[in-house]
Image: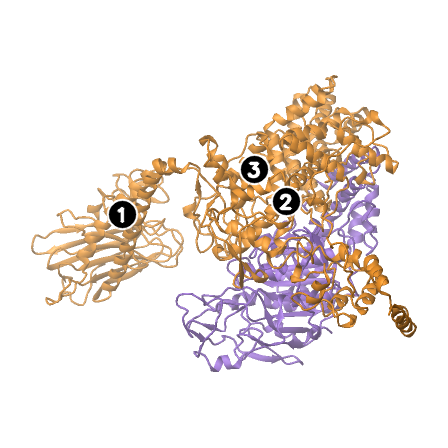
Chain colours: A purple, B orange
Amino acid sequence: MMPRRQVIQSAVAGSLLMPGILQQLLADDSPGAIEPPPGVNDPLAPRKGHFPAKAKNVIFLFMTGGVSHVDSFDHKPRLYQDVGKEVKLDHPEIKNRPGYERIFLKRPQWDFQKHGECGTEVSTLFPHVAGCVDDIALIRSMHTDHSNHYNATLGMHTGSFAFARPSIGAWTSYGLGTENRNLPSFVTIAPAQTYAGTQVYASDFLPGAHQGTLVVPGAEPIANVAPRVGRTQQERELAALSKMNQKHLATRSDDPQLAARIKSFETAFGMQMAVPDAFDLTKESDATLQLYGLPRGSSSGFGWQCLMARRLVERGVRFVELIDTGSSGNWDSHGDMMDHARLAKNVDQPIAALLKDLKSRGLFEDTLVVWTTEFGRTPFNNTAEAKGREHHNWAFSSWLAGGGVKRGCAYGETDEYGIRVAKDGVHVHDFHATILHLMGLDHTRLTYRHSGRDYRLTDIHGNVVRDVLA
Amino acid sequence: MPGLKCALTCLLVLATGPLIVFADEKEDHFEARIRPVLISSCVRCHGESKASGTLRLDSREGLLKGGESGPAIDAGKPEESRLIKAIQRHEDVSAMPPEKEKGLRPDQIAAFVTWVKEGAMWPAKTARLEAPRHWAFEPIRAVAPPDVKDTAWIKNGIDSLILARQEAAGVHPAAPADKIALIRRMTFDLTGLPPTPEEISAFEQDPSPQAVEQVIERLLKSPHYGEHWGRHWLDLVRYADTAGENSDHPLPHAWRYRNWVIKSFNDNQPIDVFLREQIAGDLIAADGPVEKYADRVVATGYMAIARRFGHDIDKDMHLTFEDTIDTLGKSMLGLTIACARCHDHKFDQISARDYYGLYGIFESTKFAFPGCEPKQQPRDLVPLLPPDEFARSIKPVLDQAASLDASIKNLSDELVGTARQLKELATKKVTSLSTGTIDDGGSAPFTANSGEQDSTGHIAVKRGDVIQLAITPRANHGADSTLVEFAITEVGGDARQWSVADLIDDFPTANPRTDRYGNAATWSYFDTRDGFAFLPENLDVIDGRRELKAWRNGDTPSIFVNTAKEPVKVWTTLPPRSFFMHPGQSGPVAIAWLCPFDGTITITGKITDAHPSGGDGVGWVLEQFHSLPVDPNATEKPLDFASAFTRTAEQRQALNAARKQRADMGPQLAVPVGFAVVEGEPRNTRLQKRGEPADLGDEIPRKFLDVLGGQTLQDGKTSGRRELANWITSPTNPLTTRVFVNRVWQWHFGRGIVTTPNDFGSRGVPPTHPELLDYLTAEFIRSGWNLHALHRLIMLSAAYRMSSAQHSHSPDLYASFARRRLTAEELRDSLLMVSGQLDPTPGAAHPFPPEASWSFSQHGPFAAEYETAKRSVYVMQKRNRRTRFFSLFDGPDPNASTPVRDVTIVPTQALFFLNDPFLHTSADKLAARLAVAPTDRDKIDLAHQLVFGRPASPDQVTDATEFLRDNPWPAYCRVLLSSNEFLFVD
């Protein structure tokens, strides 16, 4: 499948300057073979979960701004019929808000159809994803604690709606380590920062090795991975460094932290090749690029992000998050819901392509694909004619697909207008518990002792949603 | 009877087997099997000093009465007893003790089952059940130096306590470090910077026994000492330069607190004073002297920099108070108090009453307000002048400024109101006279062409009508400078003529302005995007050209003139004596003529694209707005154009005057302010059940923690911060000094005597050397909380001066000195220093944008980064977007107290050394510095001196010479700066 071994061999072949490196890099190819040297805390060593995992890697697709559930994945026929009907609600977004003394149901702007063998209804906003419903477990009963972007985004990533805490990617890395030491364990690909900034991929109190490495689409996706001097020059410098460090180590009774740092340069040297190799799309076929809707030579757009996600999990990166847009110009369609069309067009084909591509390469069974947003949008507004929708944390839709996920099912229900969860509510904590469960981690046992307390991603909450498991 | 009892019980024994025990055996069973477990595992939380869930387990009555969940035992029925279920860790009750690893052994559980089954016998005469007090709350003990064998090694009291443990473990202390390693260690420890070659050689050549002492004294006097030790404290108080709410507002005044911390360490301020001023500096400041006033107020930034939460931060102040209490508990007391926000502390003797007792103190305090999305500007910043001084010199000016601000706002509102009314008025009766477009670079003449004209193009006008020419954008491409000719001629009468050419001289005079015949408000310039907004700003100079003048609203729309008799070449060539209109990107710009007579006019004009570029051209719209007939019976005269224009002219004049007056006041208003706190409205708070601010319980008096004395306020007339400051630093409180001394030890040895320095509670790790901790604490108290004296005591010990060559596998024994990696700050500062780039002067305020311009939101949060060559402690740190370098090298968490820096070694750090531009630049500059040395050999030596603080050894010279044959000096410098020897301190 992948020519990494060859890449490295050809890169180091004939170089007698760093005899240790080749051996080291190749040794790292065998998963689970890494033993940290005694006395060194090796936070990224691959570890077994609490029970056998259904999936090995996660691709977490985050739509910034709040995707309207009633316009996308939660069909509410009564909303089309009862448009303009006044409703009375104690809703956080209308409380004490001038002009919102009265609210009225607003008609969705897209129509729904049944799709696939399972017959799950999806709107015309997501025609390509609709074609994949037989592989998806849709959850229509999501709910969250806060109707503010910042808090809800932080909550969806860290389980905490106010305080800085480790993100779900960092927890996963902490729980399982990583398989490929030439790449980070947790990668976040984002063209711009979402709400709450770097906190959404931070490791916070977990060891820093678990923090998400930010990839910004463009020329140098990972900071400092592009060599600043020629290869031969760099090899000479590394050889001189290695010699200097070895002499230093010899008089210091082989202090493991010194040894670990020597090794880190060898790994970094490998990353300089492994990362560009992972990001090099020249060997992808035209058919694959077309599937993602990606023009050859392009290194941006959600199609690029999705294809990169596949290439990274293929190489053993444990957790890849894709964020579609930054904290402005996103799904936050207060002014005009038609803006959802532009945002959906940006992600729809690439997401469907990702699912198909994972399947055709036999990676689907090992990869958990998560699609979510921070909250839904109100099925009502202060006039029935209002073009936009407001923030709605009482109900929204998310979905799971891939390793260990039940195919072609829809779980949970909202009421007749999509306002409140009517059946089988799934809180963000439950959603997190389910993701960890699929990764072989028990959310009640994945703990970290910090300032006198054992912390969890799910705090003291969370139940695994068994009905979406295969 | 005894006989009978015996017989019966014997029978029972036979019948039921070994479960039955006799009365005195029951006493024995209680004393031997039950009491020890109750004491060790239960009564600390369910006893006299704390009764979690209102349950007490220190008497039989307590067990039978039970707590919130019901009785603890049902005597005789273990299977019905909650206590038994709890220790058996049944799923339907809370497992006890809560920590799984402290769960009871099966034999202990069996003993409890037996005891309950047998009626839960509690001896009539038995000692009270009291939990042993947790070690950290015990008074500081006097420590006698233990006997040791190797007395020659001992330099001071620290050493005998360290050595005694080593000898007991059969370990020998490492040899003393060599002088070069020692001065590098001491210099990094006290200043966070490497020693200079001169400092090293002076120390090496000083054979006196006082050489070490002299280095310590020199370093303690260095201003860099406070920068390094201040940084330690800033870690604990999660210092940051932004507020951390959803839009991460900057804190432009927080730097004063940062610099106060640095100065306090440099001044060797006694630590009790240092702590007290951070809690109650504003109150202490009032005691005088006046010179200390500003510093003491600034010190309360300790509280003001607490993290803010949410969208409207006033609504989430309960979280900010939690953050304050959490930080106070951890940084000063080594306790995790904030756990008690929702419930009594699960593990420590800290109750929700304790938490809300402190909460009331902070709720009675007014914190400076940083701004947030719905309330952008800061408020409640604290003047750094004593109140009487403030009232005398500043208050009157502030009051005047406030009243000017109010009238500016009123006048602005009135102007907006008038603009809207005019818009309304202009829709009443309108005649379109001419419209059209020109293409890019085009030109077109126009004449008026209304329905009422006669064949000669005559237009009937009334006094008070408005003729308006608007220039409109087409495709919004900008570059719409439009040359306008526009003239109105009176037909008959005086045949007067009005032309825009008349406006070129005295262009900036006024808007609206009088015509050349003396008619008021005849000409007006409008931004008509939203009503008739008079272009507000006039410019006397454009692009540095004095001959160009403008009226404008922002950059565009604008109307401008070239007053010169020659063409002026700017963004395009402007012909001599010309008049231009430039629409905005999204809307037109207009010139209006207010008709001063009843009669007839003709209109001629021409527009020309004066700046062919962008390809979109512009359009024109010429309209007549008719004045409306006045109803003679109306009580109030309705608004007409003439009066509106005149009124606007007056209002604008008043507004400009007020604005100028306000701007002139600027310098007088420059009162230095702190991001600090002052007294608020003193009141007790009510307990928030489960931490929910909406679910209130009993009122809780403001108080200190019960476990440290539970003191309350004498009267409730102040917040209680002064009392709190005194309770924390009271000689009867053993915790504050122990916690601080432990930190100082950790910041020297890399490891605390208590390795959980922010948690001295029961979940923390007990001290490895309790006597040493008490010895150091006692010395610290005796010296008057003198930090520099503590440095001397520690650094003059033999333990501190050991070599780190031998890697020790049991760090608890301190058999060798622990090698450490440089912190993120030390690494950056060292790279700057050895490459000669470091700006060693102290930092001050950050270059934040002015407060008046702020409009940060969660969609567009504050996200700037500011480059500086100053030390890292002065780099601006945000809460919501951490600076990459500092997070890469395990820098402090700006959101939570950081007691210990992690040390991770990851390949992304190695990538920094391989490829980061900062590393490469530093290597280049270091290479340039080496040029002063005459020979290659000298250059190699100098490089080693600068980077490692020692000369190059012969084989290193050989290696270097060989490397340099094929590689340039910057490459060699990169190798040195990437080496372990540079990054680690022995």
Per the model, the C-alpha gap separating discs 3 and 1 is 42 Å
Q: Are marks 1 and 2 on the same chain?
A: yes
Do badges 3 and 1 share one subunit?
yes
Quarter where residue B757 is shown: top right
Of the pair A37 and A278, the residue shown nearer to us: A37
Q: Decide which of tag 3 and tag 2 comes sooner along the chain.
A: 2
Q: Helix, strand, or loop for circle 3?
A: helix
Q: Residues within 10 Å of mark 3 (few under 14, many from 20)?
A: some
Q: Position of residue B781 (x, y in %)?
A: 65, 33
* Circle 2 residue: B333
Q: Position of residue B812 (x, y in %)?
A: 79, 40
Relative to A108, B425 lies left or right: left
Graded by Cα atoms within 10 Å as few (under 14), some (14 to 19) or many (20 or more), the crowding at tag 1 reads: many
Q: Amino acid at mark 1?
A: Leu
Asked whether residue A294 appears in the rendered view, the answer is no
Residue B308 placement (x, y as % from top left):
53, 52
- Chain where mark 3 sits: B
Q: Are marks 3 and 2 on the same chain?
A: yes
Q: Secondary structure at mark 2?
A: helix
Q: Earlier in the sequence, mark 1 or mark 2?
A: 2
**Mark 2 packing: few (<14 Cα in 10 Å), some, or many (20+)?**
many
Q: Is residue B394 visible?
A: yes
What amino acid type is highlighted by mark number 2? Answer: Leu
Picture quarter with the C terminus of chain B: top right
Residue B489 in picture, x, y percent from top left: 14, 54
Q: Which residue is mark 1?
A: B655
Left or right: residue A420 compared with residue B575: right
**How many marks are shown on the rendered structure?**
3
* Image quarter in which the N terminus of chain B is found: bottom right
According to the picture, the residue beneath numbered tag 3 turns out to be B874
How far apart are the alpha carbons under marks 3 and 2?
27 Å
